[in-house]
Image (cartoon, helix red, strand yellow):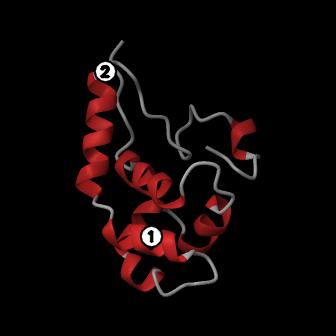
């Protein structure tokens, strides 16, 4: 089976790297910025938002490269796995209801 990722997959990977595993901030970030690609495009301004992001997250907002996330996606696909993102139709609805949604 060949997997095809969403065009936003690198942005979702980037956001997961910024927030870290088990973060309970996903819904707050999406409410504030709408989507991970919009946050990425506005990351320099978003870095000033200390109500949403910790100092460590702010550092990652600025320093993490989208190219690195594209490489993660590529390697995942090359190894026969898929990338299912939060906005994907295949993403389980029950997972979306969790505070620490993966």
Q: Residues within 10 Å of mark 1 (few under 14, many from 20)?
A: many
Looking at the picture, how far across and down is residue 28, in whole percent? 66, 68
Q: Is residue 2 above or below residue 4?
A: above
Q: Which mark is residue 5?
A: none
Please tell me the numbered disc located at residue 79.
2
Q: Residue at x 54, y 60 (%)?
A: 19
Task: Say left or right for 16 vs 43.
Answer: right
The quadrant holding residue 25 is bottom right
Write the residue at 45% across / 54% down.
17
Element carrying mark 2: loop
- Residue 45's x, y, as percent? 42, 85
> Split into 4 quadrants, where in the image is the C terminus?
top right
54 or 47: nearer the eye?
54
Q: Identify the mark nearer the N-term, 2 or 1.
A: 1
Say the numbered circle drawn on residue 39. 1
Residue 2 locus on image (x, y percent): 32, 18
């Amino acid at each position: 089976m060949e997997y095809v990722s969403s065009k936003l997959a690198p942005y979702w990977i980037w956001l997961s790297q910024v927030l870290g595993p088990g973060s309970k901030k996903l819904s707050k970030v999406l409410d504030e910025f709408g989507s991970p690609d919009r946050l990425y495009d506005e990351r320099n301004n978003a870095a000033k938002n200390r109500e949403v992001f910790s100092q460590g997250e702010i550092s990652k907002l600025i320093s993490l490269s989208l190219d690195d996330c594209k490489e993660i996606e590529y390697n995942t696909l090359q190894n026969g796995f898929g990338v299912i993102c939060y906005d994907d139709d295949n993403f389980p609805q029950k997972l979306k209801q969790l505070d620490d949604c993966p």
